[in-house]
Image (cartoon, rainbow, N blue to C red):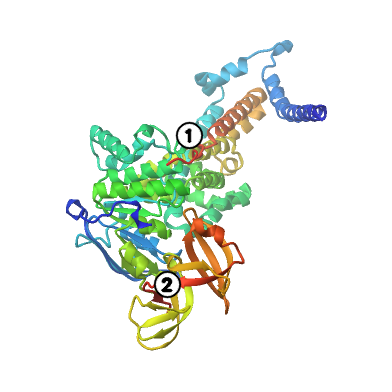
Amino acid sequence: MTDTVASPVGQQEVRRGVTVRLEGLTRRFGNVQALDGLDLEVAPGELVALLGPSGCGKTTALRVLGGLEDADAGRVLVDGKDLTAVPASRRDMGMVFQAYSLFPHLTAAQNVEFGLRLRARPAAERRARAAEMLELVGISSHADRYPHQLSGGQQQRVALARALAIRPRVLLLDEPLSALDAKVRVQLRDEIRRIQLEVGITTLFVTHDQEEALAIADRVGVMRGGQLEQLGPPAEIYRRPATSFVADFVGLSNRLPGQLRDGAVEVLGARLPLIDAADGAGSVTALVRPESVDVVADPDGAGRVLAASFLGPTSRVTVALPDDVLVVAQVASGRLADLPPGTAVRIELATVPVALAH
Amino acid sequence: MAGLIRRRARRQRAFRWAVVSVVGVFFALPLLAMLEFTTRGAGGRRTAETWRLLVDWGRLGETYPDLGAGIAASFGLVLLTVLLMLALLVPTVIWVRLRLPRLRRVVEFVCLLPLTIPAIVLVVGLAPVYAWVTYFLGGSPLTLTFAYTVLVLPYAYRSIDAGLSAIDVRTLAEAARSLGAGWGTVMWRVVLPNIRSAVLSAAFLTVALVLGEFTIASLLSRTNLQVAVNLLGKSSATMSVAVSLAALVLAFVLLLLLSLVGPGRRRRVMKETP
């Protein structure tokens, strides 16, 4: 899932971005605590994705960084300089919004030039920069079109060009792909990453789509209740979820009953190591990824196939076990023919470290 | 089946034409009668003398000084009311949308209030205020600008508010601010160009209302076009009817223009491509 874009490793030297630091950000809307002492540091040129369910505070964090929202407490530092009281118009941060935000009365090129016009740049420089940016986002042939003559994906490309034209210190992306259809979303997602690496700009990307976050980011911050639940590289977030919330939210997890004994957990007859060491003994719930579960047709097996859903190269098979335990397994789609609903099966678990639900 | 559909379509077309004709005659007949009346000459002949006099500003002012003054006052009032209304309403409504959304209902209520108050009641309330206005600014009919601005608020507010509802003001403003625009720039260079047709609608409605206003001007003893026409009706019925007809036609043309500028830019997003 994370292999769709080039790894940023080894590109640190060419990055020219700034350091962004959010310190103890707190924001309350009526009874809702949108941010609850959020701390986050983004390295120069790094792309951090904030991921979480609706209302977890990810967009508020981005808006506070962009100056579009005031924090009740806490500080926003860019390269060590406190910007908390600086208005949005003087923060030098390019932003792409979830809603289409191009100015309807201006053409694509004029939209891109807008920020430069405000900075009183000469007309020739403005035009050259707009052309360069539209070229970068691959839409230079549409420079003279008005927003209503562009598709959603094209509008978001122009919005990205407009945000980058002013050479901002930080790029803020507020769910820029969520209004687009699936195919365009994946294509534009990869392009955003390419452009971000090319420009080397420090970027905060907010999304509720875990696949998007894992595919595009250097580090992913999973948020819950206005705080970071876990911050780390995509592979770590996926393979070593710090909490049951992260395990549940990022990827799919089976919640299987098990027995904790001697630092490992016994689940469905298999003894699985733990991601984080745990003392004691007793009944626990283990979080097991579907790709760690195998289903084997066996007339003496205790399980019955309930349903199977085709996902392309792989499929998900839901198996009912005694005591109302349901297990979802990910199998190669080629094996689906052997596992029609009602087939007696047995479950085999791969010996990979698992997390425990708290 | 095809024959039935054709017959039904023919019937509907005939019905449409009948309705349009009846309504057209209902509105056009009085106007034609006015035109007929203003072109009557001695001995049953037709003459355009009244209309020639009406468009000859110098001669009109000499012949009917009150009418000339009334027309000048009304056009001055139109200009000042439009300017004051736009200066007050446009920034307020935009600001409320952007920064004080909780006040929206209150502002809407205040702006729509004049609609519920009869002009005569408004005048009773305005009379003491106008005593002060006269004290500070004199008795010029142009001082009616203040009363007229209140009078046109409901219509102008509705128009501008509808224009703002058609665009995502908040996102556009935030995008502009992130690009370095201050609040003034957001209003003038981002929001205003996108509600241009709504602002024009508000201005046209104001023009039509101010040109036709009689009650407040009459009761506050100021002479505007309608008051002058009313006075003229007692001495020169032909000219008074000609001026009324010209004012009606002007209002009609303005409303026609309004319907032309009314529909905003179509916001159709093309078929999805990356």
Q: Is residue B135 visible?
A: no
Q: Amino acid at mark 1?
A: Gly
Image: B263 above or below B88 = above
Question: SS class of the residue under badge 2?
Answer: helix
Image: A164 above or below A24 = above
The mark total stands at 2
Image location (x, y in percent) of residue A118: 28, 42
Circle 1 sits on which residue?
B76
Q: Could you classify mark 1 by the number of other residues whose Cα lies within 10 Å: few (under 14), some (14-19), or many (20 or more)?
A: some
Circle 2 sits on which residue?
A245
Q: Could you classify mark 2 by the number of other residues whose Cα lies within 10 Å: few (under 14), some (14-19), or many (20 or more)?
A: some
Q: Which mark is residue B243?
A: none
The answer to whether the residue labelled 1 contacts the one labelled 2, judged by CB atoms less than 8 Å apart, is no
Residue at position x 17%, y 53% in the image: A13
Q: Amino acid at mark 2?
A: Phe
Q: Is residue B241 visible?
A: yes
Question: SS class of the residue under badge 1?
Answer: helix
How far apart, in angstroms, are the residues tagged by discs 1 and 2? 69 Å
